[in-house]
Image (spheres, grey):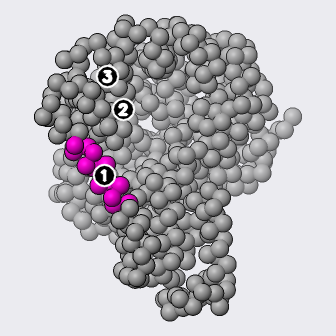
């Protein structure tokens, strides 16, 4: 028996039996495997295995300590501290754990004290602009954006020509999504220092986002004159060339960088090359670059905090709850259904929700709230769960059993409190809560707002999956399922199973908008949609792309380049160009393809 096993033999006694591991030697093998995962940077796999072991041995201080080390590697110091303190309670003599706790708490305290010292110094010496600038940067890097903006503004009232403070203020406005103010700051920077590389890059980026393509290209050319081989600048130049229809020129500019691309900038290069080859009809090359881009993304630093199974767990939980006989699905007493009722725009990512969002938001009686986590935050508040982890939004108990029995009036009031906290509303407008991922919250939506109108965006399953795979999404637990076709197919099938069962089981008022019909007959589909919502026809919705261009706060979903263009059909049935990558998944997808009224995959002519 090993020294480790002798020291902790008592603590290895399982609470729920050893059937999961078979024997103590098998358990030691699993621990070694977890350590191998950890050493090789497979942190999510290590965490999963340690958590599995802890489910059987919840009071083993060694496993708690090892799991805390992995969490520290992921930057989750608060969670790691909780586990370390639990390990220390179990094994008070563990000096190593005690020292590590002191070290982490010391570092947190040191950072807190540094901030306090900077604030105190600035308060005592308001004319010390160097310290004021240092404080602003410290706040900006510490996610205290609002206070950072206040500090930089104060500095600039004293020293208007401080262009580095202007640049930092520009970054702060970007974090606040106030792109107009951000661009103004970077233009002021260039007025003082015409070769400020960061300002040129940001102005080119903002110009592309605002569809000021010629101006953006002039900025990026100035940046490339300073740093000709800068990967981000070359990538952005290629994006601008593509958007101006110069596909061949964009490919010639970007393709030489493909072999040396790595990191987050490398991801963007490969995703852009995928788009360019797709538009040129080079589908093998396009898929090659999309695969490389997705692989690079999974190796990035952000991905260390992500676990794709967390979101899937939430979906499965909602499915289980939907089938449970113990859940009461009775509609609430109409007396409690008071106050405003939002409409909900749901679907699956890349199913046309952003296009519908812009069409609806063009109507003067409508205001669309774009992808705010209001429903998830409401559920979290009701169930006392946390909604955020270091790696993004955590999986929530999004099934109705989590809130069953609560005061529905209070839940509805809480929802709108969250809306008002996250969103600036206009008076006398119908609120439409647009969020594709709210599809998994449909039980809770139905429970709190049984009279709500649900708009469901539908698109061919293969096109949805392909488009999701082709997007360089910001990593989170849900989007992590789109880095392979196989994973994307699996998530789609589970989410749409949940949707289908919800439609069968719940008293939903649903209007389905089929993407293919929308792009073929915008006016006809828009009239039916507005009729469903009880709104008068408004011709301006047909010019949704002009509305999207005029918005102060731009759409920041991956569809932003598309919704500023008039309607087009080039994305309709695009998946047929990539059919061979879908063929291994035909049997899994077939029930949804046929069930949603599309032609059977098994009958498609391969010629």
Query: In this figure, which residue is indicated by the disc labeled 3?
Result: 165
Does the residue at mark 2 contact the one at mark 1 (Cβ under 8 Å)?
A: no
Q: From the top left corner, tell me how far across and down residue 506 is, in percent.
A: 41, 59
Left or right: residue 282 versus residue 233 is right
C-alpha separation, residue under disc 1 versus residue under disc 3? 25 Å
Query: In this figure, which residue is indicated by the disc labeled 2?
Result: 175
Say if the magenta span includes residue 41.
no
Label 1: state its secondary structure.
helix
Q: Nearer the viewer, mark 2 or mark 3?
A: 3
Say if the magenta span includes residue 114.
yes
Query: Considering the image in quadrants, where does the C terminus appear?
Result: top right
Near-viewer residue (138 or 351): 138
Mark seen at residue 110: 1
Main secondary structure found in the magenta portion: helix
Q: Residues within 10 Å of mark 3 (few under 14, many from 20)?
A: many
What span is colored magenta in the figure?
A: 104-117
Residue 238 quadrant: top right
C-alpha separation, residue under disc 2 versus residue under disc 1? 26 Å
Q: Residues within 10 Å of mark 2 (few under 14, many from 20)?
A: some
Q: Residue at x 33, y 33 (%)?
A: 137
Is residue 158 shown to the viewer in this render? Answer: yes
Q: How many marks?
A: 3
Query: Considering the image in quadrants, where does the N terminus appear?
Result: bottom right
Q: Residues within 10 Å of mark 1 (few under 14, many from 20)?
A: few
Label 2: state its secondary structure.
helix
Q: Is residue 238 above or below residue 433?
A: above
Q: Residue at x 40, y 69 (%)?
A: 99
Q: Nearer the viewer, mark 2 or mark 1?
A: 1
Q: From the top left corner, tell me how far across and down residue 428 is, in percent.
A: 20, 30
Label 3: state its secondary structure.
helix
User: Mark 2 or mark 3: which comes first in sequence?
Assistant: 3
């Amino acid at each position: 028996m090993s020294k480790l096993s002798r020291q902790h033999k008592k603590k290895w006694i399982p609470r729920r039996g050893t059937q999961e591991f078979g024997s103590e030697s098998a358990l030691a093998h699993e621990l070694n495997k977890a350590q191998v995962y950890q050493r090789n940077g497979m942190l999510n796999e290590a965490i999963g295995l340690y958590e599995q072991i802890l489910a059987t041995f919840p009071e083993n201080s060694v496993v708690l300590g090892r799991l805390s080390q992995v969490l520290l590697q992921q930057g989750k110091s608060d969670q790691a501290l909780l586990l370390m303190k639990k390990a220390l309670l179990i094994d008070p003599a563990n000096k190593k754990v005690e020292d590590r706790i002191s070290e982490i708490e010391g570092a947190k305290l040191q950072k807190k004290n540094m901030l306090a010292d900077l604030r105190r110094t600035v308060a005592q010496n308001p004319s010390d602009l160097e310290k004021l600038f240092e404080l602003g940067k410290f706040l900006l890097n510490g996610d205290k954006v609002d206070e950072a903006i206040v500090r930089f503004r104060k500095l600039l009232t004293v020293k208007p020509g401080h262009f580095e403070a202007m640049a930092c203020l520009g970054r702060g406005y970007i974090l606040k999504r106030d792109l107009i103010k951000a661009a103004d700051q970077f233009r002021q920077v260039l007025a003082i220092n015409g070769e400020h590389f960061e300002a040129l890059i940001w102005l080119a980026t903002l110009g592309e986002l605002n569809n000021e393509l010629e101006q953006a290209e002039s900025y990026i050319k100035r940046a490339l004159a300073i740093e000709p081989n800068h990967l981000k600048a070359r990538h952005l130049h290629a994006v601008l060339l593509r958007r101006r229809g110069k596909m061949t020129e964009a490919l010639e500019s970007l393709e030489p960088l493909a072999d040396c691309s790595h990191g987050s900038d490398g991801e963007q290069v490969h995703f852009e090359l995928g788009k360019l080859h797709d538009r040129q009809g080079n589908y093998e090359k396009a898929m090659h670059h999309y695969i490389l881009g997705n692989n690079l993304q999974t190796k990035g630093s952000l991905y260390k905090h992500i676990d794709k199974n967390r979101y899937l767990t939430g979906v499965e939980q909602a499915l289980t709850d939907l089938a449970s006989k113990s859940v009461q699905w009775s509609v609430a007493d109409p007396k409690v259904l008071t106050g405003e009722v939002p409409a909900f725009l749901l679907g699956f990512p890349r199913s046309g929700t952003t296009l519908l969002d812009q069409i609806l938001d063009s109507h003067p009686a409508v205001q669309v709230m774009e992808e705010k986590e209001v429903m998830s935050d409401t559920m979290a508040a009701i169930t006392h769960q946390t909604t955020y982890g270091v790696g993004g939004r955590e999986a929530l108990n999004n099934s109705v059993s989590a809130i069953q029995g609560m005061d529905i009036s209070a839940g509805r009031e809480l929802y709108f409190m969250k809306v008002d906290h996250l969103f600036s509303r206009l008076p006398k407008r119908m609120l439409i809560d647009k969020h594709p991922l709210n599809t998994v919250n449909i039980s809770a939506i139905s429970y709190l707002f049984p009279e709500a109108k649900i708009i469901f965006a539908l698109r061919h399953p293969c096109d949805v999956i392909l488009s999701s795979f082709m997007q360089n999404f910001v990593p989170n637990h849900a989007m992590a399922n789109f880095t392979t076709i196989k994973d994307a197919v699996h998530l789609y099938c589970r989410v749409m199973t949940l949707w289908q069962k919800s439609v069968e089981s719940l008293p939903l008022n649903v209007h389905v908008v089929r993407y293919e019909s929308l792009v073929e007959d915008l006016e006809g589909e828009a009239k039916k949609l507005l009729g469903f919502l009880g709104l008068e026809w408004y011709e301006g919705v047909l010019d949704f792309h002009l509305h999207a261009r005029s918005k102060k706060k731009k759409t920041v979903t991956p569809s932003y380049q598309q919704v500023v263009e008039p309607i087009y059909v080039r994305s309709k049935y695009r998946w047929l160009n990539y059919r061979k990558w879908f063929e291994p998944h035909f049997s899994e997808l077939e029930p949804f393809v046929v069930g949603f009224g599309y032609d059977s995959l098994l009958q498609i002519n391969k010629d």
